[in-house]
Image (spheres, grey):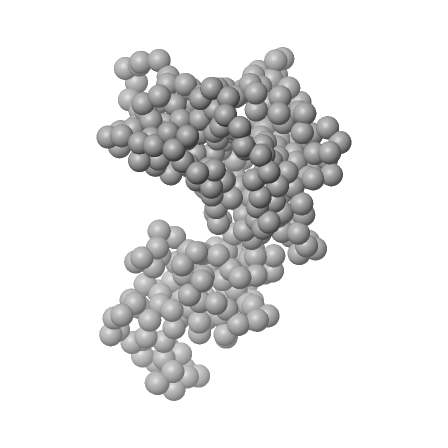
Amino acid sequence: MVLCGTSAVLAHLVVAWILSQIHDGGNFVVQGLFLNHQKHNTPKTRRDALTWLVQTGVTTAGLTLTPTDRDQAKAVGQLSQPIDVDRFLSSGRSVSPSGISGQASKSRPETGIRLREGSEPERDTRTGDVSAEILLQSSGSSNVPVMISFRSEKWPLATGSIFDVECRDANSGDSAFLAVTPNTNGKSLAELDDSFVVDAVFSPFGRFSAYGEPTDVRVNGSEKKGNYQILDVSFSTLSQSTQTELPRHAKLVATIPKGTNQAVILVGSSSASRWKKGSDNLISKIGDSFRAIPAPSSEMKARVVPRPVWKPCNDPIC
């Protein structure tokens, strides 16, 4: 069953307390709370408790779980099929991302972008020039300010809690956004496989994984232009409404700014059908304008802007 109103609030508090009292591998047992279950069925671990909640069909919107070995996982709701608890606890995602439980467990995309405090992404409406200042890791794990720029003549800067630095066509879903890779450990792009960049973009929590991880990810071409690596990638995303795969195409332009140990990526993408009708030229033009260079020295401390609180997005692409 799905609880709402006062009942949902009460259930939320009860479930949160239960899970806060149960620890993996611990000996704590909640007594007298699961009145319809015999003592030998009482959940003894967080995994047992989560399984019990799903099997009994209780869901509380917005409930956040905090397992000791996970940064964050979202509570799941009623499923029409058995839940894969191990996968849920390891990824924080539902095995049915388009269903009720998938919507409850959907989280804010992780692009790796850390905006510098005191600056915000901007776009000149006359020229389409986009600029932002982000922070990357150096070899000593300190923050290195980096200036980002590219030109998006047709697509406005997207705003809202789900976006970091992104320009998009709200009608078609075509977009260009920034992403950052994990630490390169001092390696250059020439020393890294294409998969290093691809995995950062198409990660389980990435921009294209709102309703499930992308499938059929293929690198169709790779070339180097100066300090920039350009990848031509095709893939498919899952439709929320029809639960079918939607073919898409993307161009990834990556570079490692001097003095940093992370690559910045400009990702331009569109549906496969629009790609063949001219979107490829538009996105290639945006990619050619992309630049990422160390920011000028400043007395301002390099602090990260706190990420905004995530709010649900009705956009089928996000």
Q: Nearer the viewer, residue 227 or 245?
A: 227
Give residue 221's position: percent from left, percent from top.
58, 34
* Residue located at (60% from left, 49% from top): 216
Q: Nearer the viewer, residue 249 or 121?
A: 249
From this view, report whether residue 92 is shown above or below residue 181: below
Question: Is 118 on the left-hand or right-hand side of 108?
Answer: left
Name the residue at 55% across, 18% down: 289
**Image quarter of residue 114:** top left
Please provide percent x and percent y for residue 113: 43, 33
> In terms of depth relative to the viewer, which is nearer, 106 or 250?
250
Say if 173 sits above or below 246 in the image. above
At x 59%, y 23%, the residue is: 286
Q: Position of residue 176 (x, y in %)?
A: 58, 30
Q: Is residue 261 above or below residue 103?
A: above
Question: For this view, does 104 lie left or right of residue 184?
Answer: right
Q: Quadrant of the C terminus?
A: top right
Q: Is residue 243 visible?
A: yes
> Which corner quadrant of the image does residue 158 belong to?
top right
Q: Quadrant of the N terminus?
A: bottom right
Viewer-side residue, 262 vs 241: 262
Image label count: 0
Q: Residue at x 35, y 85 (%)?
A: 40
Where residue 252 sits in the image (x, y, percent)? Answer: 54, 32
